[in-house]
Amino acid sequence: MGDTPYPLRTVTDDELDHFFRMISRAFGEDVRPEEIALDRLTAEAGRTLAAFDGDEMVGTAGAFTFDLAVPGGRLPAAGVTYVGVSPTHRRRGVLTSMMQRQLADIHERGEPVAVLWASEAAIYGRYGYGLASRRMDVEIDRTQTAVRRDLPVDESVEVRLVAPADMQDAVEAIERAVVDERPGQFVRDARWVETALADLESRRHGRSAMQGVLATRGGRPAGYATYSTKASAVRGHAIADGDIAVIAQRALDPAADLAVTRLLLSLDLMRRVRWWNQPLDSAIPHVLTDPRQARSIITDGLHARVVDVPAALSGRRYARPVDVAVAVTDDRCPWNAGTWRLVADGDGVADCERTDAAADVALDVEALGAAYLGGTPLTALAAAGRVSTTNPLRLNDLSVAFGWSRLPWCPVIF
């Protein structure tokens, strides 16, 4: 039940509605039955923790069971979510007790990694979560640029508008096919796709209903996008001033992706096109005649936590051979603490085991989580004083080995 004055336990399925109402209060949001119904599609009651003051629920934390893409493979992982404490019970150790209990549960489940999106980024470092990926929002003013004319056109790709409710099977097939392209993505089944295509009125914020774009090749799904629009009165000199918010866009190959992008940049009466939550190495700026017009806001994405050092480090691949001893400090998960020898061969296949050798590189588990998905160079962390080394050449080798050909990114904020 926990070691604080506020006992912890998992909630039952019958208690989930109350659990979600507690989360809404903690985040200062309205309680909406339609939102709760949607949350229930993916919720796992057996992985939801609540803290209680008598009969009152005062803290919540949950997790999803993920099959997570890591560099060169997949690992079971916990998608940490639903973390909140009642305003009446903050600064009383409720959060710490829940996070500590959750880490122990994740370890017992055999999940080497945990990931989360942070509502407040300053909170989770003290529990070992490091900033592992970044995301960007992109806005293009169509009056200032256009798609380059020298880009190829694949005539085999057909693009059409489709109601989102009618393309669930196509979206699921595309998402499953591309999940291994980037670290940080997780396998999304029909439940997750249904939530992604749900068009709740409360989420529109004055915009249109969700629209869908489907690209096919030979009758088979090749790409898709969802978006909503906001029309605007025609302003002076008859310049249209509407905008498009692209909610999601994925494709099996660059040609299908470019076909969808062309359509989105060609909708009449829409001056601005905004893409939400794109990877930092998105192709969008590079298809424009003036890439400067892809104006971007960059913020943090996934935060990652290594829960089992040998399983996590041997469960991914590496960009170059490496043989290095790494000292890890971890106050929350003592089984991680110590020095580990990481050896990766020419194919990137790795082995990690304890060693008594002197460490070449030393870091805490937060820094290890930041580097784990290949999006944060260890050399950058060393420049910030968060990684130390007795051998700069070994550190450089390890930093390169941790990198990957595609930057990590998660298309879903969970």
Image (cartoon, grey):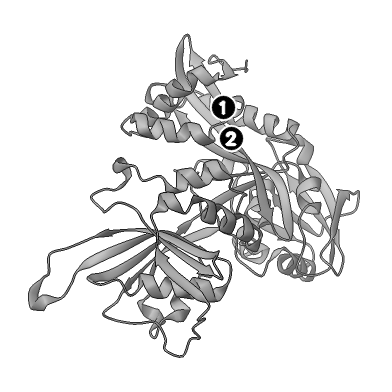
Q: In this view, does 293 lie above or below 111?
A: below
The residue at the point 53 percent across, 41 percent down is 191
Give the residue pinned by disc 2: 63
The residue at the point 71 percent across, 41 percent down is 307
Q: How far apart are marks 2 and 1 (CA)?
A: 7 Å
Residue 227 is left or right of residue 411, and the answer is left
| Coordinates of residue 31 in the picture (x, y in percent) | 33, 29
- Label 2, residues with CA under 10 Å away: few <14, some 14-19, many ≥20: many
Q: In this view, does 218 lie above or below 43?
A: below
Question: Which amino acid type is shown beneath numbered disc 2?
Answer: Ala
Q: In which quarter of the image is residue 99?
A: top right
**What SS does tag 2 mark?**
strand
| Coordinates of residue 248 in the picture (x, y in percent) | 45, 58
* N-term mark: 2 or 1: 1
Q: Which of 133 and 78 is in front in this view?
A: 78
How many labels were placed on the picture?
A: 2
The reply to whether callout 2 and callout 1 are in contact (CB within 8 Å) is yes
Looking at the image, the residue that sits furthest to the left is 236
The residue at the point 46 percent across, 34 percent down is 39
- Label 1, residues with CA under 10 Å away: few <14, some 14-19, many ≥20: many
Give the residue pinned by disc 1: 48
